[in-house]
Image (cartoon, rainbow, N blue to C red):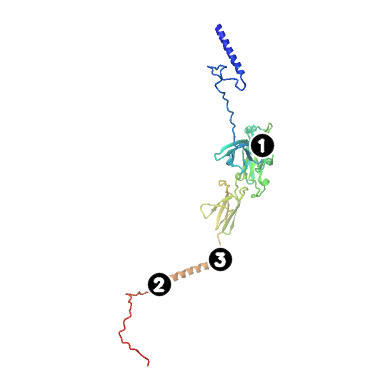
Amino acid sequence: MAANLWLILGLLASHSSDLEWCQSKPRHLPQLWMMSPVTQAPPHLPLTTAAVREAPPTAVTTPIQNLHIDPAHYTLSWDPAPGADITTGAFCRKGRDIFVWADPGLARCSFQSLSLCHVTNFTVFLGKDRAVAGSIQFPPDDDGDHEAAAQDLRCWVHEGQLSCQWERGPKATGDVHYRMFWRDVRLGPAHNRECPHYHSLDVNTAGPAPHGGHEGCTLDLDTVLGSTPNSPDLVPQVTITVNGSGRAGPVPCMDNTVDLQRAEVLAPPTLTVECNGSEAHARWVARNRFHHGLLGYTLQVNQSSRSEPQEYNVSIPHFWVPNAGAISFRVKSRSEVYPRKLSSWSEAWGLVCPPEVMPVKTALVTSVATVLGAGLVAAGLLLWWRKSLLYRLCPPIPRLRLPLAGEMVVWEPALEDCEVTPVTDA
């Protein structure tokens, strides 16, 4: 027992001396050394294992920095990082939209619109491999109860009016009141204007709906934009924002960008028909504001002389039918921009045009001309027949050219064998 007690005291003394030795070392050496639990180097022996220090973490660098959104100008901008080599074009993406190339010579991307209500992720890409250079969310999440905001916002244009509808948020309390605002997409939120004609369910009002339950609004575009369909100042897109508030305070908003041409519901043209003698003339006028000059037409003609109605695709707003008789027309519009966008059929219009009647003088002239023409044709045939008969009875005698027969004889001068008597003058 005494031996065991002396052993414990010896171990404690040895451990205490080890601590005193470590504390007496210079400060540039580590104060604690990790020893093997089996063998420990005595404090008086030199260290044979060098201390290993962990390398500092490598800083993650990106080629761009200071990524930020400018909501007033609808731009996403950034600064090139110091020393970064950005030699390839940059492009951006808003949410799930298509890619947008950066503005030429500038470190920014421009968008047609930005939502100020629901959080959208913006990403910058570099290089042909579309490497992600940075991303940001806008607007920052305000931690509001988004399920109390208006839901399922949808808008359409019909006969010069913009109508929008939405549904109450599933967690909106009964006292939540919604209001709708609109503005030209090219302008900022400071240009918001409130929609004047609210409606709720089946109740249409020109002011607050019962119980503050606004679920839709209608805007007269001819009043706020003018009645000229081809004006150079025609607004192409509008931003619709629906705000909400209750006793507990405001709820998150809902917004949407509406392309007025895409949202336009084509109305059937206004059709008029008339007879011009035996001809039927149909003409029509389109009643669409944002498809001016971008419409084609399908005309259906039902004529008593035909067993089935005939359809014609035309690009001009009128059509002629000769010798119409009993006839009816109807027409519909089709978009040249969105081929599947069609209007309904217009109201059918029918009429009966009288048969064609020529004046007596005109009929007499026509008859005389017909008789003279027939006589000339008969005379021509008779002359041709006579000439053909004479040719067969008295065929012409062919002209013959007789060739020279035999061989050509060459005459040579012969010697004179007669006496030649010279003659002299007397």
Query: Which residue position is annotated with label 3?
Result: 362
Looking at the rendering, which quadrant does residue 7 occupy? top right
- Going from N to C along the chain, the mark reached first, 1 or 3, is 1
Tell me the residue at 42%/72% (across/down). 387
Q: In the rendered view, would you say 203 is above or below 13? A: below
Helix, strand or loop for disc 3: helix
Looking at the image, do the residues carrying marks 1 and 2 touch, with CB atoms under 8 Å apart? no
Q: Give whichever of 379, 23 is nearer the camera.
A: 23
Q: Residues within 10 Å of mark 2 (few under 14, many from 20)?
A: few
Q: In the rendered view, would you say 229 is above or below 217? A: below
Give the Cα distance between marks 1 and 3.
77 Å
Give the Cα distance between marks 3 and 2.
44 Å
User: Which of pointers 1 and 3 indicates the residue nearer the eye?
Assistant: 1
Q: Residues within 10 Å of mark 1 (few under 14, many from 20)?
A: some
Helix, strand or loop for disc 1: strand
Q: Which amino acid, by three-letter code, is at mark 2? A: Tyr
Query: Which residue position is annotated with label 1?
Result: 243
Q: Give whichever of 313, 291 is nearer the camera.
A: 291
Give the Cα distance between marks 1 and 2.
105 Å
Helix, strand or loop for disc 2: helix
Q: Residues within 10 Å of mark 3 (few under 14, many from 20)?
A: few
Residue 201's spot in the image, x, y percent?
Answer: 64, 38
Which numbered circle lies on residue 391? Answer: 2
Residue 255's spot in the image, x, y percent?
Answer: 64, 38
